Image (spheres, rainbow, N blue to C red):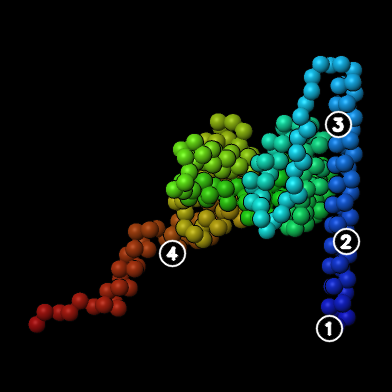
């Protein structure tokens, strides 16, 4: 037992060291990229392009005890856009260099290929904090304005939640949005057990959700356990009458 615990401890320490090494490597790469961009900018200025640019502040490292991960990523995306970073080659590695805690753990667990894809990195990091497509859907449906919020600020917050929901659901056009709303309403019409069954299988569209539902119904004898809703209600009524018989008149 002691040997097993010692082995597990060594494996954990090795994993932590590996994550730290990967973080430092990402930070080094980020410094190289910044140096390259600054060198390129200096060259353009010295050649007399006729423009100057104020030096932008650097983004602070993500702190999971203080920062909201969704807000942090939103700020990172704005910063990356303002700095004209190439999304395909720079966003993922630059974000990776700023992560800590669970976010860094999820980033480090990605394959080398996936760690270079920004959308994959963002989805993995958000998922580490429970921010999945369904999580943002629930936030969007439940959100309410605070007393201090203006109409403009609340509408922006709503927009950001909806945008995240659609992004993580991979909705890119009208047909995708149409199908997403159909699936949401379909789930709302299911029992909790049925809805859980469908979510576990992650249907890609309403047709696939319907196919999984047919499998579920075949195994559970209809939408309601034991048959139709009317039959279930009748069974409940009969059971209630047995437990609470109506007294006979003399």
Q: Earlier in the sequence, mark 3 or mark 4?
A: 3
Horizontal and vertical percent position of residue 101: 75, 58
Between residues 155 and 217, which one lies in front from this camera angle? 155
**Residue 17 got which mark?**
2
Q: In terms of depth relative to the viewer, which is nearer, 237 or 167?
A: 167
Instruction: Kindly identify which residue carries mark 1.
Output: 1
Q: Which mark is residue 226?
A: 4
Residue 206 shows in the view:
no
**Residue 194, how many percent across, how many down?**
51, 57
Q: Residue at x 34, y 63 (%)?
A: 233
The numbered mark, 1 or 4, whose residue comes first in the sequence reads: 1
Q: CA distance from mark 3 to mark 4?
A: 67 Å
- Mark yes or no: residue 152 visible: yes
Distance, label 2 to label 4, CA atoms, is: 55 Å
Of the numbered discs 1 and 2, the one sitting upstream in the chain is 1
Q: Earlier in the sequence, mark 2 or mark 4?
A: 2
Few, some or many residues within 10 Å of mark 1 (<14, 14–19, 20+):
few
Q: Which residue is mark 3?
A: 37
- Asked if labels 4 and 2 touch by Cβ distance under 8 angstroms, the answer is no
Q: 126 above or below 81?
A: below
> Mark 2 against mark 3, which lies toward the viewer?
3
| SS for dot 1 | loop
Residue 135, placed above or below residue 175 = below
Q: Residues within 10 Å of mark 3 (few under 14, many from 20)?
A: some
Spatial separation of the CA atoms under disc 1 and disc 4: 49 Å
User: Between marks 1 and 2, how big is the CA–CA gap?
Assistant: 25 Å
Dividing the picture into quarters, in which one does residue 31 lie? top right
């Amino acid at each position: 037992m002691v040997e097993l615990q010692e082995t597990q401890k060594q494996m954990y320490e090795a994993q932590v060291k590996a994550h730290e090494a990967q973080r430092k490597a990402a930070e080094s790469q980020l410094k190289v990229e910044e140096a390259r961009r600054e060198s390129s900018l200096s060259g353009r200025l010295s050649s007399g392009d006729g423009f100057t640019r104020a030096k932008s502040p650097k983004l602070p490292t993500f702190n999971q005890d203080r920062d909201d991960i969704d807000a942090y990523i939103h700020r990172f995306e704005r910063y990356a856009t303002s700095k004209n970073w190439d999304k395909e080659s720079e966003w993922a590695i630059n974000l990776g260099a700023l992560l800590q805690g669970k976010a860094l753990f999820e980033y480090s667990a990605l394959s080398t290929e996936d760690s270079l894809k920004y959308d994959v990195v963002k989805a993995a990091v958000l998922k580490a904090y429970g921010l999945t497509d369904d999580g943002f859907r629930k936030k969007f449906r439940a959100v309410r304005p605070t007393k201090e919020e203006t109409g403009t600020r609340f509408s922006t917050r709503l927009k950001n939640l909806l945008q995240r929901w659609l992004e993580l659901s991979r909705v890119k056009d009208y047909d995708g949005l149409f199908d997403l709303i159909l699936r949401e309403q379909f789930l709302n019409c299911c029992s909790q057990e049925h809805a859980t069954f469908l979510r576990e299988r992650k249907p890609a569209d309403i047709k696939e959700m319907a196919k999984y539902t047919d499998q579920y119904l075949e195994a559970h004898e209809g939408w309601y356990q034991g048959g139709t809703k009317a039959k279930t209600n009748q069974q409940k009524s009969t059971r209630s009458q047995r437990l609470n018989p109506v007294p006979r008149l003399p």
